[in-house]
Image: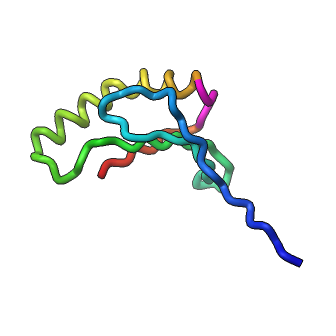
Amino acid sequence: MSHIANFNIPERVTSINHPLVSEAYLKKGFSANHESEDILVIETTIHEDEEHDAYDNYLTSFMGDLHDLQLQAEQQIGHFDRIDIRTH
């Protein structure tokens, strides 16, 4: 008997429009107390190896727009529990 693995395939979020966002998706995860949660993952175009001032400026700009990005995502996917931000 073969078992088919149940893969958690992230749902791509296409509604986020921002020059510092390269990709966004919704994935399932677990909180510290082992409860299931929906996580919006935003991958940015911000590179950690950029000049310190440039990195800080990009990050400050991005964080200032985070609430608007959250609203854009919620219009497409509904409620989620948290946001993870990834830089390169």
Front-lying residue, 12 or 66: 12
Which residue is the extreme one toward the right? 1
> What residue span does the magenta drawing correspond to?
76-80
In the image, what residue occupies the spot 11% across and 45% down?
52
Residue 54 as seen in the image, left or right of residue 67: left
Residue 68 as seen in the image, left or right of residue 29: left
In the image, what residue occupies the spot 35% across and 28% down?
18
Which part of the image, by quadrant, shows the N terminus? bottom right
Quarter of the image for residue 6 reads bottom right
Residue 19 locus on image (x, y percent):
31, 30
Residue 31 locus on image (x, y percent):
60, 51
Residue 33 as seen in the image, left or right of residue 41: right
Residue 23 as seen in the image, left or right of residue 51: right
Residue 12 locus on image (x, y percent):
55, 40
Q: Is residue 82 above or below residue 47?
A: above
Front-lying residue, 43 or 4: 4
Quarter of the image for residue 55 reads top left
Q: Is residue 87 above or below residue 82?
A: below
Q: Is residue 53 above or below residue 69?
A: below
Count of picture labels: 0
Q: Main secondary structure of the magenta part?
A: loop
User: Which coloring applies here?
Assistant: rainbow
Say whether residue 59 is magenta: no
Front-lying residue, 10 or 86: 10
Residue 17 locus on image (x, y percent):
41, 26
